[in-house]
Image: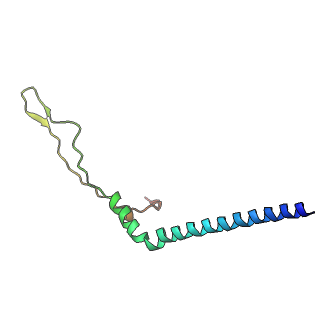
Amino acid sequence: MGKRTQKKANINLRFNILTVLIYIIGIIFIAQLFSLQIVHGAEYREESNTRLTRETTLEAARGSILDKTGTPLVTSKMEFSLEMYKSKVDTRKPKPSNT
């Protein structure tokens, strides 16, 4: 019976060590999550917002359309400027109109 008791004690010891390691890893993960969300959350959110903002100028794909004498019939020029802010976009579904 001595061997059986010793085997059982070894299994219990291994189980206890494994349980303690899992708890330690869980505590480390929770501490990291707390640090990311609560401690540094505002600065990471601000950094994310600045990365999402960019200004680009898109040139027209075509040039001017000229007649056979070289007089421009149609020219390309920019007419619209679009600004979109992620924080101001309404993602709710629009209400149907009664018209």
Look at the picture and state if 54 lies above or below 5.
above
Point 70% across, 63% down: residue: 18
* Residue most extreme to the top: 68
Residue 20: horizontal and vertical position, in percent?
68, 68
Residue 44: horizontal and vertical position, in percent?
40, 66
Looking at the image, residue 59 sits to the left or right of residue 11; the answer is left
Residue 52: horizontal and vertical position, in percent?
35, 58
Label total for image: 0
Q: Nearer the viewer, residue 51 or 72?
A: 51
Point 19% across, 48% down: residue: 78
Residue 84: horizontal and vertical position, in percent?
32, 58
Point 36% across, 66% down: residue: 46
Image quarter of the N terminus: bottom right
Q: Nearer the viewer, residue 30 or 90?
A: 30
* Quadrant in the picture for residue 6: bottom right
Image quarter of the C terminus: bottom left
* Residue most extreme to the front: 2
Q: Nearer the viewer, residue 73 or 21?
A: 21
* Quadrant in the picture for residue 77: top left
